[in-house]
Each structure stands twice: as structure tokens, then as C-alpha cells.
Amino acid sequence: MSSIKNAPGKKEGKMRIRAFPMNMDEKYVNDIWTLLKNAIQEIQRKNNSGLSFEELYRNAYTMVLHKHGERLYSGLKEVVTDHLVYKVCKEVEESLNNNFLGTLNFVWTDHQTAMVMIRDILMYMDRVYVQQNGVDS
């Protein structure tokens, strides 16, 4: 058997592997967020047939991994709030005098379905960023 010798001047000890330093520039973060935002909006419009959920999950994972979880979390909150206020609320208000409960049930079911798909994409953010920062899930 051969023995591995340390280079001259180095102390003997455990070999450490350092993490690969990869910083995400702001443009790349913006591009990923724009992609995710558009995908979330497509899911809310029930137009998700062309989406790659694996790619979306990977992009969300990358954002959280590189310490951009806050951007992802606050962006998601804004997109969902805008959808509820400007589309869902308007739809429900327009049905106040005609089929209110049917409309309310319909938009609630659609919202639940969309949120399940969005949750699947952002599962890593929910498990890591949300728990570490104690924000609402």
C-alpha cells in the first residue's frame, strides 16, 4: 500500500473539502424569479400544460439555496395576493346577485388546486426558508 504524504510545510490532519463558491448575480436571480412568477400566474389561469414542474422546482431550490428565499417568499405572497384581489374578488363580487355560492365554491376549488401545484414547486422553500425564518407557511 502506498501512503499519501502531505506537501512540504503543511500540517497533517483531516482533509477538508470547501464548498464551491458560486454567487448568483442579480440579473440571474431576476430571470429565475420572472420565470417562476410567470409559471405561478399560468397555474392560476389553469394554463399549466406546458410547464415543466421539475425545472420550476429546481429553479426555486436554487434561489433558496443561494440565499434568495426572501425574494421568492415575498414575490409569491405578492403574486397570490394580486390574483385574489384583482381576479377572484372581482369574480365573486360580480356574482353577488346571481349564483353567488356556486361562484364562490368554484373559485375556492380553483384556488385550492392552484395552491397545491404551487406548493409542489416551492416545497423546498417551505421546508427550508419558511421554517428557518419563522414566517407564515
Image (cartoon, rainbow, N blue to C red):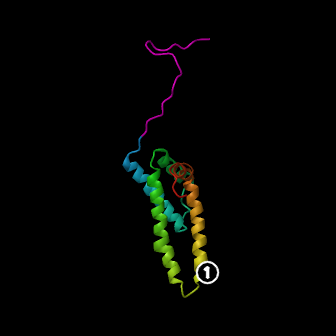
Residue at image mark 1: 102
Quarter of the picture containing the N terminus is top right
Image coordinates of residue 9 in percent, x first then y, are 43, 13
Q: Is residue 13 magenta?
A: yes
- Asked if residue 81 is positioned above or below residue 51 in the image, the reply reads below
Q: How crowded is mark 1: few (under 14 residues within 10 Å), some or many (20 or more)?
A: few
Image coordinates of residue 83 in percent, x first then y, are 48, 69
Quarter of the picture containing the C terminus is bottom right
Q: Magenta stretch mostly in which secondary structure?
A: loop
- The residue located at (47%, 67%) in the rendering is 81
- Asked if residue 136 is positioned above or below residue 61 in the image, the reply reads below
Q: Which residue type carries mark 1? A: Gly
Image coordinates of residue 117 in percent, x first then y, are 58, 60
Q: What's the magenta region?
A: 1-22
Residue at disc 1, secondary structure: helix
- The residue located at (53%, 58%) in the rendering is 136
Q: For this rendering, which residue is in front, 94 or 54?
A: 94
Residue 27 appears left or right of 57? left
- The residue located at (54%, 88%) in the rendering is 97
- The residue located at (44%, 12%) in the rendering is 8
- Residue ranking furthest to the bottom: 97
- Residue ranking furthest to the front: 134
Image coordinates of residue 3 in percent, x first then y, are 57, 12
Q: Does the magenta stretch include residue 30?
A: no
